[in-house]
Image (cartoon, rainbow, N blue to C red):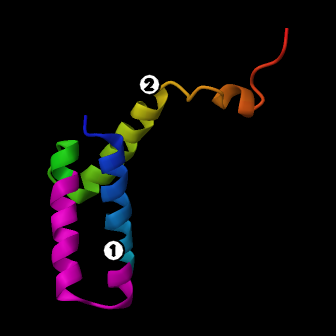
């Protein structure tokens, strides 16, 4: 599985470029979107960006479930009570 940070960056950049292209067509941004799409496909092991986006979301969901919360996070969230 790719590093979740890299996956988040790629997803954010994909969204930014795609939104920008809705407002103005730019050949450079179109190429960048193609490159990001290929990178997302490579990271997720999929053939199309339509498959890569939900696969990336699923990978991020799995990674957040596996990662322990930072020290003190449970107390800060009010999840730890005094005995």
The rendered magenta stretch, by its main secondary structure, is classed as helix
Q: Which residues are magenta?
A: 20-40
Q: Residue at x 15, y 59 (%)?
A: 38
Please tell me whether mark 1 or mark 2 is closer to you in this view: 2
Q: Horizontal placement of 65 versus 82: left or right?
A: left
Q: Nearer the viewer, residue 57 or 64?
A: 64
Q: Horizontal placement of 72 versus 36: left or right?
A: right
For mark 2, give the secondary structure. helix
Tell me where residue 22 appears, x and y as whole percent: 36, 84
* Residue carrying label 1: 18
Tell me where residue 66 appears, x and y as whole percent: 44, 25
Image quadrant occupied by the N terminus:
top left
Q: Nearer the viewer, residue 41 or 80?
A: 80
Dividing the picture into quadrants, the one containing residue 61 is top left
Q: Quick check: marks 1 and 2 in contact, CB under 8 Å?
A: no
Is residue 67 rendered magenta in the image?
Answer: no
- For the view shown, which residue lies furthest in the front direction? 71
Q: Vertical placement of 62 versus 39: above or below?
A: above
Q: Bin the neighbour count of mark 2 within 10 Å (Cα to Cα): few under 14, some 14-19, many 20 and up.
A: few
Q: Vertical placement of 3 versus 79: above or below?
A: below
Is residue 27 rendered magenta in the image?
Answer: yes
The answer to which of marks 1 and 2 sits earlier in the sequence is: 1
Q: Residue at x 37, y 67 (%)?
A: 15
Q: Residue at x 48, y 28 (%)?
A: 65
* Residue carrying label 2: 66
User: What is the CA distance from the residue labelled 1 to the residue labelled 2?
Assistant: 30 Å
Tell me where residue 23 appears, x and y as whole percent: 38, 89
């Amino acid at each position: 599985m790719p590093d979740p940070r890299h996956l988040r960056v790629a997803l954010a950049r994909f969204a930014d470029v795609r939104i920008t292209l809705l407002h103005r067509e730019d050949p450079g941004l179109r190429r960048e979107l193609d490159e990001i799409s290929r990178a997302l496909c490579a990271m997720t092991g999929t053939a199309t960006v339509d498959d890569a986006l939900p696969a990336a979301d699923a990978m991020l969901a799995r990674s957040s479930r596996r990662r322990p919360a930072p020290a003190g996070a449970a107390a800060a969230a009010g999840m730890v009570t005094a005995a």
